[in-house]
Amino acid sequence: MRRGDGAGWRTTAMLWKGEGVNGVLESPTGTGKTLCLLCATLAWRQHFKDSITARKIQERMHGAEMFPDRPTADWGSGEPGAQGSAYYSDIPKIIYASRTHSQLTQVISELKQTMYRPKVSVLGSREQLCIHPDVKKQENNHVKVHMCRSKVSTRSCHYYNNVEEKSTEKDLTTHILDIEDLVKNGTKHRACPYYLSRSLKQQADIIFMPYNYLLDQKSRKAHNIDLKGTVVIFDEAHNVERMCEESASFDLTPYDLASGIEALDLVINELTDNLEQKHISAQFNMEAPSSSLNVELEDLAKVKGALLQLENSIDAITLPANGNGVTKDGSYIFELFATAGITYETKTGLLELLDQIIQHVGGSSGVFTNTLGLQKLSDIIQIIYNIEVPEGSAAPTKNLQVSKSYKVHIHLDNSQKKKPRGDIWSNSRKQGGKVLSYWCFSPGYTMHDLVKQGVRSIILTSGTLCPLTSFTMEMQIPFPVTLENPHVIEKHQIWVGVVPQGPDGAQLSSAFDRRFSTDYLSSLGKTIGNIARVVPHGLLVFFPSYPVMDKSLEFWKENGLSSRIDDVKPMFVEPRGKGMFTEIIDAFYERIQAPKNSGASFFAVCRGKASEGLDFADCNGRGVIITGLPFPPRMDPRVILKMQFLDEMRRTQGAAEKYLSGQEWYRQQASRAVNQAIGRVIRHRQDYGAIFLCDHRFSKSDARAQLPSWVRPYTRIYDNFGHIIRDVSQFFRVAQKIMPPPVSKATQKDKGPCVSTSDSELASNSSFAASRIRENLKKAKMLDSHVPSLKRKREEGGRMETQSDFCEGYEENTDVVARRPAGLLDALDHSEKRLQGEQSSDEKITRLSTLSLQYDKRLSEENRGSKKKIKIVQNKALEGGSPNKKMSSASMFMLSVKQCLSQESYNLFTMALTEYKKSDDLKSLITKLCTFFCHEPGKHVLMRGFYQFIRPHHKKEFDSACKKFTGMGCGYKPEHSIPRVERERAQASSDSKVTFSESSSEHLNHGEGHLSSESLKANNYMLHLQ
């Protein structure tokens, strides 16, 4: 019997006990817990349905049997006892929640393999499901929401209008669909997948959703999720504690208040203009203009006054000189918001007013207006005043539960986020604004709210929940059913070693005082390099944090250590941004799949995208290296307050309640992150792998005690590094002989296929694998749209590769017929292909090594508001190279745009260029450019960089628009308005009144040489705009 079957029978037993019985089930990955949970709950639900059927038959047959050879009792309990329902509408729905949609896709894939065919619905956001082209092209999610709502309310979205008719289609109602299937079928039937999923939810037997949809009261309301009588399963529940706390918390920044005030100013000005127009129209008997906003000017002024008063109240709080901020009781939040006139009595009217304003501003066409501040204020009011006060009752001024579970923390705003233009009276424009934080430290606060909705049973399951006693205690709801499953593997399938020192004898310690020391970084690099030589196929390396990973990779590169690892196993690095992750992980899988190679290494961080929910089964992950303990930031105010909260709970509740102390919780956070990363390998009963704990602190018994129960018995501490290499080599030799070779899967969504180790199979599969690699390399070429090269040093004439060289590594080696570029994308590809060199497929894959490091560093600097933004410069010619290898500034600009926009948005951007070329409509162009580049300060430079493509007679107007929307102009001068033909004529004639030398062309554009004759020809060749 599979160990995961224990989860199945425990679940079934728990459900049969009746309503209000909850369970916590811990079972390692690979033990089949997902399949067992699905089958157990669906079987119980079917039995529940059969019981009702049997009862109805008995009533109609008056006790006689319909089928003598099959008594009704075999269908289910015919007595109205345990289940106690006589209506099919009372059959409980099952809600299956996990952390991400990618994890839900894996669960749905498991469901498809069972005999059960329930009616299924999977809920997602508009960002994932919307197929309307106008809404999809919006970069900002809030704009998408309000534009969608506007189109739905006016019935101007034909996809939404088709939902009612198409929701009965057989493809949609009888098949089990995940998110991708839903979008595909919605597109096929021209019906909105977002509203289709909501429609299918009404009749669904099982509903899949991310668990923040359940835990967040606002999301629950937005998706109209009815929990009464449902069985709720939280998979990957080790994150539920944190999600419970975060969904009930907020941080209100000066930027939020300032952007909210700015949006209100725009609406007030609009309403004032409308009133003036109505007055003029009345005087001249003309038709008055209409407004979609049915709000009085006085009400808008009150809302603005409330925001200003709230800002003043926060600003008036005195902070200590040491900069640590001030902490107050949770109930202080009611007192603070009351000063701004926001109370239980006024919240309903204020929320309705805010909703109208947000809907009006977000749904209106034209230049983008930031509604995030108003939306956040609306969310905050709902979080604070989430307790419904019975009509006629007095509103609570001090809530004991809030005082117990919450803290209010006020501290200086250290972020460098650029403030909006705002109001001249706004304190947020002052230096040293304050952030108001309202933090929940009790997951039970949210879980109690869930139980109040009438949930029948709650099941929490994961591979890393231990210790269960403290976990269930924090949830503050009873869990009478618990289960801790062992793993399904045997001794010869796992090797675990603590590596306290590297091959050079230096101690391995990622502690705060050692993690950036040169001897540690050098020893760690040598350790990984040696391990990479003995671990076959895929090797995973997990760091405590992104800064530690970045610093390590930079040091290894500077000192030649990365090239040693790269020569054995090409290095792939987890990106911080989610946009590039799929391409990079697919390229990693392809490298593993390629025949006759030594595998690849994937560098990631604990708690990152690769450490949770991703499947590195079989040869995709034969070894995992943990480089340190990922403790939370010790001096972070939220961490300090959480530890104090737990210490207080333990002191007041008594030791018998088994609450964790603050220090125990702190250690547990690190160990759970490590355990999740360890769980990426050994994904099923036929899998095997090695685990390397490369930190001397794992030698201590308390650190090893926090490891998973299935890992602890096999853990061995090594004093000699040579013995590690010897034992690991022996382990893999034995495992490869004993274990059956992994089954190759040609098409698999979440993991790449593994290659059999036999020569015959390699020969038969080599042709297929090569074609797959070529296909995926073509896809990997898209990475140059998002990631700049790290300018890695190569031994090719001793020169440094340029940014354009990156394109060489992913260009498919095919003959391209010479032709004139037909459009923008073709022109860009043409420019890239001219720089293409001859490289082998292995070298092309290897180019993905450490690609995201420089991009991520730049991205983090932009998020912090650093002045180091996207720098659009002309690519320097290679030393001794010919002029035709020099990229024009136009090509460089387009590459920079590709790096910052998604492929879909980039296509819309090029369409906007084409429309401008045809229509010469500058206002329309500016509106579209603002949607791409004006939302985030980091993209403002791209807005100004577009100046080079603007026609001369529009230069001045575009420069003014840039000043308005980005706060900086493009360096406009009157001579920029001179048409291109005249500029060229002037450049050719020395007697011309206006002369443009090479130096003056650079001066005109602040050093950007895009007005030189050569660049002008390139720009004209690409765009034909001027």
Image (cartoon, rainbow, N blue to C red):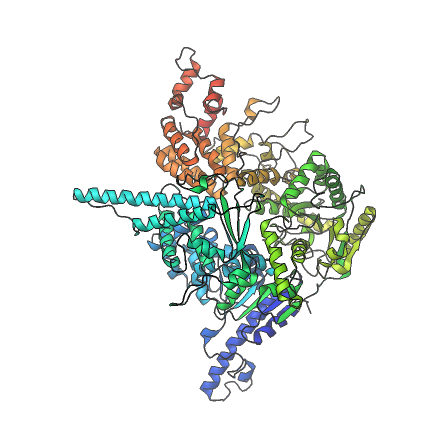
789 vs 685, left or right, is left
- Decide if residue 689 is on the left or right side of residue 454: right
- Outermost residue, top side: 991
Residue 764 picture location, percent across and down: 68, 49
The reply to whether residue 131 is in sight is no
Residue at left 36%, top 43%? 265
Q: Nearer the viewer, residue 139 or 118?
A: 139
Residue 985, compared with residue 533, is above or below; it is: above
Q: Is residue 907 above or below residue 69?
A: above
796 versus 850 height, above or below: above
Whether residue 168 is situated above or below residue 435 in the rendered picture: below
Would residue 119 be seen by someone viewing this image from the given angle?
yes
Instruction: Report how many numbered discs are placed on residues in the image.
Output: 0
Tell me where residue 921 appears, x and y as whole percent: 35, 34
**For residue 638, side relative to residue 127 (left or right):** right
- For residue 352, which quarter of the picture? bottom left
For the C terminus, the quadrant is top left
Q: Quadrant of the N terminus?
A: bottom right
1026 or 670: which is nearer to us? 670
Tell me where residue 470 appears, x and y as whole percent.
64, 64
Tell me if 343 is positioned left or right of 177 in this view: left
Q: Position of residue 790 (x, y in %)?
A: 62, 35
Q: Nearer the viewer, residue 325 or 225?
A: 325
